[in-house]
Image (cartoon, rainbow, N blue to C red):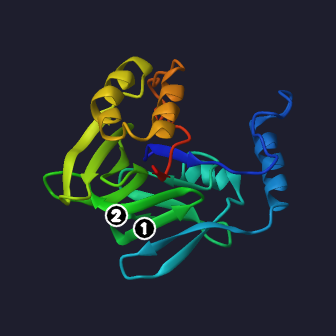
């Protein structure tokens, strides 16, 4: 697969690719899945705004095989380090460069266009993880890794940029104590959720073709009171 994909969202009602009998071939399983997908009405699950101000709707996947080929996973949308992959109303997989997108909204997930701290100043989509009255925490996925950025609202500067999470429990506990908790100590619900995620043992496996941030599992666009 040319691109390493982060699988951010898979919401397909009553569909489980791995629940079918083992006697079926892979082709038969995918065929059955596609038949069940046809039962889903075409419905927008979100949208993005281009830098020119155009609004583009994102739809549920209709063809699991095409999604696996084009995105790398039977999912509604995916992000690489440079592109957004999504389905149009007809079910076709479309790819667009992130630098051409201003904002992306899917469910509770919100992404905004920010620089990634590279020497060339590239603009990419950052997922807003959490914010309070002083700071905004964002996450950027690139080449199998998650990077975090903390923006100071009052001084309009980054406190830190491109701090990499290891995506294993032991190292992420140290990461959280240094880069997250000091800035959100008055946000007990967020701290509680982080501790809950860190209470489970996890570790990134070599050769993974899709990734999730175990540290930030279930945390997105969180607003501290």
Q: Is residue 202 above or below residue 192?
A: above
Please give the residue where the numbered disc 1 appears in the rendered image: 103
Give x and y (percent) for residue 123: 27, 61
Say whether marks 1 and 2 touch (CB < 8 Å): yes
Look at the image and tell me whether residue 130 can be seen: yes
Dot 1 or dot 2: first in sequence order is: 1
Give x and y (percent) for residue 74: 64, 48
User: Is 189 on the left-hand or right-hand side of 28?
Assistant: left
Spatial separation of the CA atoms under disc 1 and disc 2: 6 Å
Give x and y (percent) for residue 223: 47, 52
Of 205 and 191, which appears nearest the observer?
191
Please give the residue where the numbered disc 2 appears in the rendered image: 113
Characterize the local packing of mark 1: few (<14), some (14-19) or many (20 or more) Cα atoms within 10 angstroms: many
Look at the image and tell me whether residue 212 can be seen: no
Of 197 and 192, which appears nearest the observer?
192
Characterize the local packing of mark 2: few (<14), some (14-19) or many (20 or more) Cα atoms within 10 angstroms: some
Q: Is residue 48 above or below residue 181?
A: below
């Amino acid at each position: 697969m040319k691109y390493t994909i982060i699988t951010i969202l898979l919401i397909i009602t009553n569909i489980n690719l791995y629940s079918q009998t083992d006697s079926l071939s892979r082709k038969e399983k995918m065929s059955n899945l596609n038949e069940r997908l046809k039962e889903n009405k075409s419905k927008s699950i979100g949208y993005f705004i281009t830098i020119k101000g155009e609004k583009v709707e994102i739809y549920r996947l209709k063809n699991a095989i095409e999604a696996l080929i084009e995105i790398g996973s039977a999912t509604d949308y995916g992000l690489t380090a440079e592109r957004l992959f999504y389905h149009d109303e007809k079910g076709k997989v479309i790819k667009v460069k992130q630098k051409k997108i201003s904002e992306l909204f899917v469910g509770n997930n919100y992404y905004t266009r920010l620089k990634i701290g590279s020497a060339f100043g590239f603009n990419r989509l950052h997922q807003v993880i959490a914010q309070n009255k002083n700071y905004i925490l964002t996450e950027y996925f690139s080449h199998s890794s998650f990077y975090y950025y903390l923006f100071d609202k009052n001084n309009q500067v980054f406190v830190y940029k491109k701090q990499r999470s290891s995506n294993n429990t032991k190292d992420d506990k140290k990461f959280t104590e240094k880069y997250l908790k000091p800035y959100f100590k008055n946000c007990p619900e967020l701290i509680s959720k982080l501790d809950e995620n860190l209470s489970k043992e996890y570790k990134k496996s070599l050769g993974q073709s899709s990734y999730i941030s175990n540290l930030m599992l279930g945390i997105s666009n969180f607003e501290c009171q």
